[in-house]
Image: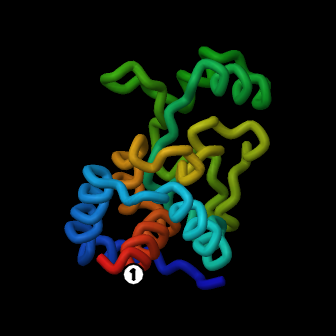
């Protein structure tokens, strides 16, 4: 597996972002037959090449959205009441979602890139980078966002672009 250099990754994204987002917009507007099968096949290849623990860029630069279930589960795990947990770690954004106050995530161990609450982490974290959603076109906006944060998403989209000869 290749080690991920986040500085190089950010430069790569900056250099190719317009081209990749244009490709994804075309995919969204006129998806080819078998798009979701192709996505699953290429996704399997990506995860043979990358390991999230080499990166953790999502935890360093993004915040999950905490659901009510997440709040209850995590606060109980930390032996805190929900209100105290929210006051200590979260804020409510303009849409009413609970988000981390700080970045990197307060539960990320920066030495190991491991999550201190992995077993009870937010559902948003557990599903990231959301490649397993059934219809890619229903989540294209998520892919467009995540190419800037997740090397696996970037690599998946690039593999699909190469496979399609675009």
Quadrant position of residue 48: bottom right
Residue 3 in the image: above or below residue 61: below
Left or right of 99 in this view: 95: left
Position of residue 51 measured from the top left corner of the image (x, y, whole percent): 65, 71
Residue at x 63% of width, y 36% of height: 122
Left or right of 65 in this view: 74: right
Left or right of 18 in this view: 154: right
- Is residue 23 in sight in this rendering? yes
- Is residue 59 in sight in this rendering? no
Residue 15 in the image: above or below residue 32: below
Question: In the rendered view of the protein, which quadrant contains the C terminus?
Answer: bottom left
Residue at x 42% of width, y 60% of height: 149
Position of residue 1 measured from the top left corner of the image (x, y, whole percent): 66, 83
SS type, badge 1: helix
Q: Residue furthest bottom?
A: 2
Residue at x 52% of width, y 62% of height: 39
Residue nearer the viewer, 51 or 57:
51
Residue nearer the viewer, 154 or 22:
22
Q: Mark 1 highlights which residue?
A: 8
Q: How many marks?
A: 1
Q: How is the image coloured?
A: rainbow
Position of residue 16 measured from the top left corner of the image (x, y, whole percent): 26, 75
Residue 18 in the image: above or below residue 119: below
Left or right of 117 in this view: 135: left
Quadrant position of residue 123: top right
Q: Residue furthest front?
A: 33
* Within-10-Å neighbours for mark 1: few <14, some 14–19, many 20+: few
């Amino acid at each position: 597996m290749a080690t991920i250099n986040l500085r190089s990754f950010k430069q790569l994204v900056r250099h190719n972002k317009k081209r990749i987002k244009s490709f994804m917009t075309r995919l969204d507007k006129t998806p080819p037959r078998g798009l979701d099968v192709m996505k699953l096949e290429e996704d399997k290849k990506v995860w043979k090449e990358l390991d999230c623990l080499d990166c953790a860029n999502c935890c360093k630069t993004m915040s999950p959205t905490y659901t009510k279930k997440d709040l209850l589960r995590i606060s109980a795990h930390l032996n805190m009441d929900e209100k105290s947990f929210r006051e200590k770690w979260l804020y409510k954004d303009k849409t009413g979602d609970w988000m981390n106050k700080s970045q990197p995530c307060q539960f990320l161990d920066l030495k190991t890139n491991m999550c201190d609450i992995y077993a009870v982490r937010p559902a948003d974290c557990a599903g990231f980078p959301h490649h397993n959603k059934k219809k890619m076109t229903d989540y294209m906006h998520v892919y467009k966002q995540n190419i800037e944060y997740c090397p696996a998403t970037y690599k998946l989209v690039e593999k699909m672009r190469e496979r399609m000869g675009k």
